[in-house]
Image: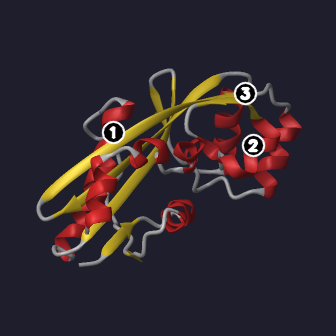
Amino acid sequence: MDIILASSSPRRKKILQKLGYNFIIKVPNINEDNTSKLNPIDYVIDVSMRKGLKVHQQYQNDYVISGDTIVEFQNKIIGKPSSNQDAFEVLSLLSGRSHYVISALSLTYNDNQITIFDSTKVCFKTLKKDEIENYINNFNVLDKAGSYNIEDAEKYFIKNIDGCYNNIVGFPEQKFLKSEMKRILDEK
């Protein structure tokens, strides 16, 4: 029985390795559209769970870890931008304001599933147009919820963070370390 990380996120991979787990990666292909109009927390949990179930269908004897991360601003989900112009509009919207990064993490095993989530408050500095354009031109924003990666944006955009830093990265580490999920993986 292997541990499978159902994610293409290099950040989730890095954190899971840092925590001492050996695993293989299988990337699920699911529709992430919010067709059921779920609220931000229910949505991120739903996507995380569906990713885990998708991979578990093929690897039923293994332990599948899956996750998802979104940005929530004024109770609206901000996903990945569709273009650089979209990224500019999102970063302009977040400028000088606070938003929440919500990450869910699921463990699917033996026809069971456990899911945890965390929410971290992020406050942006007030950004100038050229700062936003410079960031977009120098970093890959198109595959990042909210149009930014905390590791890159930290020195440019972030005024303060209230909560788990690695949750912003995409892995709710503080909740994971106290969870039943960790106990099950450690006993595996």
**46 to the left or right of 99:** left
Residue at 54% x, 48% y is 80
Q: Secondary structure at mark 3?
A: loop
Amino acid type, callout 2: Glu
Question: In the rendered image, which quarter is residue 118 located in?
Answer: top left
Residue 167 placed where, x, y %? 52, 44
Mark 2 in CB contact with mark 3 (< 8 angstroms): no
Which quarter of the figure is the N terminus placed in?
bottom left
Residue at 26% x, 59% y is 184
- Residue that numbered label 3 is attached to: 95
Residue 181 placed where, x, y %? 30, 53
- Residue that numbered label 1 is attached to: 43
Residue at 81% x, 30% y is 127
Q: Secondary structure at mark 2?
A: helix
Q: Residues within 10 Å of mark 2 (few under 14, many from 20)?
A: some
- Residue that numbered label 2 is attached to: 154
